[in-house]
Amino acid sequence: MKEVHAASISSSTLLQGQVALITGASRGIGAATALLLARHGAAIGVNYYQNAQRAQAVVETIRASGGRAIAMRASVENVHEVEVMVQQVEQELGPIDTLVLNAIAASQPVRGGAQAGGNWSSRQFLNSTWEQYQEIVMRLLVGAYVPARVIAPLMVERKHGNIIAVSSTLARVPYSGAGALAAGKAGVEALLKALVPELGPQGIRVNVVAPGAVETEASAPYIQAHKEAISQALPLRRVGQPEDIAATILLLALPQASYLTGNYLAVGGGNYLP
């Protein structure tokens, strides 16, 4: 994520009075989303699991520009921790209007599992075991399920809410070795799709944002090594930045987008053409 200084954040009232909780918001897409939504007036709950310093830096940047934000540690697969986090957000900032599902569960890998020998999200099918696939799929799915399951009833009570999941175009256009990642993200998309008719009558919107190639701290080593080739393969001829994804999430968070639900928005510079 590009460094953002308080002086570069100008105020706006597009989300004035709104509260957003963003899981996995200490860096990358989550941090960019927190900063952008705050720039437009929203109070922000910054969820993190490991990096308290990075999460607090996001909060301080928001506060320095006159915004409201708090940082909260919670493992997104732990129901109790998520419940405590949600209570804290609602007590200190107000009722949650928008939930951005961006975090992956931080469960320890199974013995000899997906993290053995490198990238936890990449493993050739013919060299895999079910336990390794299961670990990746479940970490992705539970990271969306638990926060949504805790917060959706509160939104139902208020007949108002907005749930946005960050998926990946890999769920629909996977590369070799990304079968488990694709399956897990596809599971998240299927879950969110099922919530559209269930929660819509309660005034809750549900949408999915699917990034393509995005240069984050986690992806930087690969992106930087292949940036030219990746860029030339994309119609827009550039690799995405976290701010590109954050801008799409902002669009879906706007009150003016009140008739947008059940949408899949691919944000990949043209890498996915349905």
Image (tube, rainbow, N blue to C red):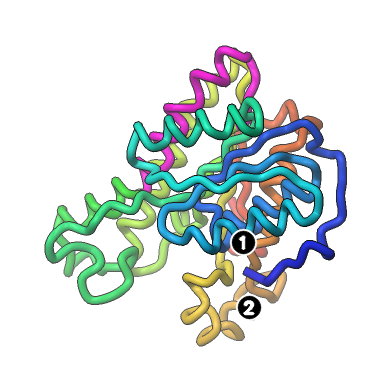
Residue at label 1?
A: 57
Q: Which mark is residue 173?
A: none
Image point (35%, 69%), residue name: 176
Compared to residue 80, the image places residue 8 above or below, namely below
Characterize the magenta stretch by its predominant secondary structure: helix
Left or right of residue 205, residue 222 in this image: left
Compared to residue 200, the image places residue 33 above or below, namely below
Residue 238 figure quarter: bottom right
Query: Magenta segment range?
Result: 140-162
Residue 169 vs residue 36, the one in the foreground: 36
Image point (49%, 18%), residue name: 153
Residue 213 seen in this snapshot: yes
Tell me the CA gap for discs 2 and 1.
31 Å
> Is label 2 in a helix, a strand or a loop?
helix
Q: Position of residue 262 (x, y in %)?
A: 59, 32
Q: What residue type is disc 1 on?
A: Ala
Q: What residue type is disc 2 on?
A: Ser
Q: Position of residue 177 (x, y in %)?
A: 32, 68
> Is label 1 in a helix, a strand or a loop?
helix
Residue 111 vs residue 121, the one in the foreground: 111
Q: Position of residue 84 (x, y in %)?
A: 44, 32
